[in-house]
Amino acid sequence: MTQQVRQALSEELRGGTPTCEQIARRLAIGVRTLNRRLQGEGTSFQQLLAELRCELARGYLGDRRLSISEVAYLLGFSEPSAFHRAFKRWTGHSPQAWRRTH
């Protein structure tokens, strides 16, 4: 289930922040069932979303042709400032600082 949710999340990110309801509907299961199955695998919807965004962010930031704003958009953030806060929470560094050192 974890891999299916990650796949669905990666496909839905460009349209904004995907919701648990959207992903459950896409997988043709109920929200409670989705959450229960993920819990059984030791994870949660929000945890998978954050992990995927962090992983993708690192890859996107490695491409210096993309601006920080473009990376934020590709990850489904409504504003670059929300992306900055999230990235700092995930890595302990700002996107600019991470980009400079990697």
Image (cartoon, rainbow, N blue to C red):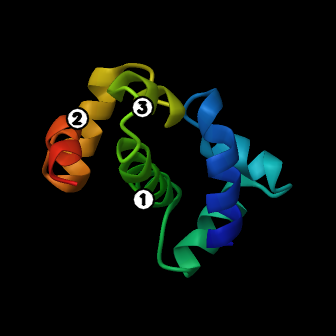
Along the horizontal axis of the image, is 66 left or right of 102? right
How many other residues sit within 10 Å of disc 3, few (<14), some (14-19) or many (≥20)?
few
Q: Which callout, 3 or 1, points at the residue further toward the start of the chain?
A: 1
Q: Determine crowd level at label 2: few under 14, some 14-19, many 20+ residues with C-alpha closer than 10 A.
A: some
Tag 3: amino acid = Arg
40 lies above or below 30: below
**Label of residue 36 in the image:** none
Q: Which is more toward the observer, 65 or 12?
A: 65
Q: Residue 94, position in %: x, y?
A: 17, 39
Q: What amino acid is found at the position of numbered circle 2 in the picture?
A: Arg
For the residue labelled by badge 3, is the local secondary structure a helix, a strand or a loop? Answer: loop
Q: Which mark is residue 85?
A: 2
Identify the residue shown where x is 35% and y is 43%.
61
Q: Which residue is mark 3?
A: 65
**Is 51 or 72 nearer to us in this picture?**
72
Mark 3 to mark 1: distance in Å? Answer: 23 Å
In 3D space, how far apart are the residues under numbered discs 1 and 2 (Cα atoms)?
15 Å
Q: Position of residue 72 (x, y in %)?
A: 41, 30
**Label 2's element?**
helix
User: Measuring 16% from the left and 44% from the top, which residue is drawn there?
Assistant: 100
> Could you tell which of marks 1 and 2 lies nearer the N-terminus?
1
- Say whether disc 3 or disc 2 marks the residue closer to the N-terminus: 3
Quarter of the image holding residue 83?
A: top left
Which label was assigned to residue 51?
Answer: 1
The x, y position of residue 33, in whole percent, is: 71, 64
Q: Return the residue found at the far front.
A: 65
38 w.r.t. 93: above or below: below
Q: Is residue 42 left or right of residue 12?
A: left
